[in-house]
């Protein structure tokens, strides 16, 4: 396989993935960069300068493929910045990139565990936790608090139905869980003690990009007096603001409507929850009541 | 077919219907009562007293089958009250019930047309109307304002996907329409000029029972500054209050989740939107800003 084919295939896979959370995909991106470096290294005529320029190019393509997901940008940027320090021989340069990528992935995994530890401090035995969509961070929190025990309320999260993946995991943790349509969020949020959601990005003003429907859940939680927390590692924080973000739209076929004259289907995957609806941000470092 | 079989079949059909609006079902109930009366009348030994008592019993069964839908209670109650005036011979009594039922149905159809005429006064050319679920009243409004022209935003309305039925009708009216998942309501409500929803019941305090998700839409409309109107004939008004209502729950299989240990599926069809989120109530008589 040529480096170009490898890159093409990785980019397609990244764009098509509907189920993985942003951090999980960001870590996969670092894996793809390592794979790409190995393919390049197999061509013995390559120079370190060529390697740096090609890896940078591929990493930047990955960064732009999922603009709603800050960790993809941020974790890859950490690696891109380190490419200035490449050792002078090709073999050493390749090893250096492999080691740094592995380190960044480990840091990201550690951060998820530390977010879960912070979140546990907020949860009491018998608490009912409401969540929407799937997030590897939220799943880690459930692993961490399953013993209290806790209960869960989970939405199906149309059109991808990520909620189904989440309840499979919650079932294997033996957590008593209620599974509902997205439209029933307002009916059930009042039965929960706390709402916990992940994030694809936290913008500069504290507003949160997450799966479409998160904003509705935040409104219903506020109206019902249930605290609403965003749980994410600090590499989800972005320099972007609500005015310059792009919300990814996916295939309209996912909604399964037979095409009809004058009818247009929209399938925007993310929405923006303003910071005024957020009770706190749980990161690996602390729980902040206000983001800015 | 015996009268009992007829009644049983009608009740099953009424309970199973997921797609018809409350007024439409209420009118069908009157049709079933007429059908039931004819089956009873075919037994020549019946007395008028027996007829009154059996018809009352059947009508009351229909009333309790769909407790979230006020017009089913109210239109049938109109007929039940008239059963005190039955003429003394069986043939006359049957004709009387047929005529009264037909009159009540006509009044109900007229009321829908008059609601649509009231609503037209609120709509300007090029307005974008956002709605959720399907309602024969809302459909009548679209027929009445299609020429302005207007545009529409429609949710799919899981799990029954009544939105699909609505966009088929809007397409045949050539209304430019955006079709979205329920979870995208918050993303799109800001692109609309007005939200119009039907109702299954309007409770004594002005809160509205309608398809699950209506409350979320009302929250998002309020947060975004878009007016939110409830459109319904006065026979949707109920003497019930939010504390003594029963929200119908349907088969959990409709959500399509493979059964899993510790996971319970809920499929509540209706939610309650408090009057504080409602900009106005459009009835056949007027547009009220406040219900109480």
Image (cartoon, coloured by chain):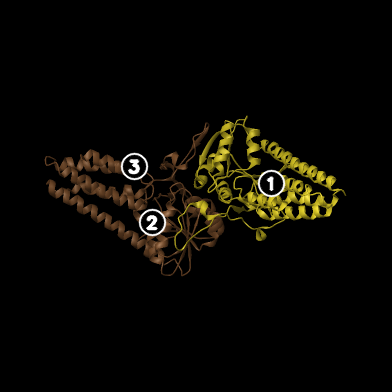
Chain colours: A yellow, B brown
Which label sits in the foreground, 3 or 2?
3
> Mark 1 highlights which residue?
A289
x, y percent for residue A39 = 75, 47
Image quadrant containing the N terminus of chain B: top left
- Cα–Cα span, label 1 and label 2: 43 Å
Picture coordinates of residue B112, whole percent (x, y):
34, 59
Q: Write down the chain letter for disc 1.
A: A
Q: Are marks 1 and 2 on the same chain?
A: no
Task: Report which residue position mark 3 lands on.
Answer: B65
Determine if marks 3 and 2 fall on one subunit: yes
Q: Please report the residue visible at 50 percent of the width from the left and 52 percent of the height from the top.
A: A255
Mark 2 surroundings: few (<14), some (14-19) or many (≥20) residues within 10 A: many
Which quadrant holds residue B224? bottom right
- How many marks the image carries: the answer is 3
Q: Secondary structure at mark 1?
A: loop
- Disc 3 residue crowd, few under 14, some 14–19, many 20+, Cα 10 Å: some
Q: Quadrant of residue B171?
A: bottom left
Which sits in the foreground, A237 or A108? A108
Which of the pair B22/A83 is nearer the observer?
A83
Tags 3 and 1 on a common chain = no
The residue positioned 18% from the left and 42% from the top of the image is: B51
- Give left or right: position of A144 versus B3: right
């Amino acid at each position: 396989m040529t480096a170009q084919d490898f890159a093409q295939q990785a980019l397609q896979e990244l764009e098509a993935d509907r189920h993985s959370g942003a951090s999980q995909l960001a870590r996969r991106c670092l894996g793809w960069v390592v794979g790409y470096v190995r393919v390049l290294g197999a061509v013995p005529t390559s120079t370190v300068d060529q390697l740096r320029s090609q890896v940078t190019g591929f990493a930047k393509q990955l960064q732009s493929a999922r603009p709603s997901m800050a960790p993809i940008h941020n974790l890859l940027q950490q690696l891109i910045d380190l490419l200035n320090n490449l050792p002078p021989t090709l073999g050493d340069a390749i090893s250096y990139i492999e080691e740094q990528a592995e380190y960044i992935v480990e840091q990201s995994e550690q951060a998820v565990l530390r977010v879960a530890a912070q979140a546990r401090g907020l949860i009491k035995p018998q608490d009912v936790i409401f969540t929407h969509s799937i997030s590897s961070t939220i799943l880690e929190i459930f692993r961490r608090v399953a013993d209290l025990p806790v209960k869960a309320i989970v939405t199906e999260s149309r059109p991808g139905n990520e909620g189904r993946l989440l309840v499979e995991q919650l079932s294997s943790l033996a957590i008593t869980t209620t599974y509902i349509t997205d439209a029933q969020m307002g009916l059930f949020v009042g039965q929960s003690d706390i709402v916990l959601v992940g994030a694809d990005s936290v913008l500069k003003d504290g507003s949160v990009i997450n799966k479409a429907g998160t904003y509705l859940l935040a409104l219903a939680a506020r109206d019902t007096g249930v605290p609403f927390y965003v749980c994410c590692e600090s590499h989800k924080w972005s320099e972007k603001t609500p005015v310059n973000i792009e919300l990814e739209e996916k295939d309209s076929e996912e909604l399964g409507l037979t095409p009809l004259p004058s009818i247009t289907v929209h399938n925007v995957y993310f929405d923006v929850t303003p910071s005024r609806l957020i009770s706190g941000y749980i990161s690996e470092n602390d729980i902040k009541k206000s983001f800015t």
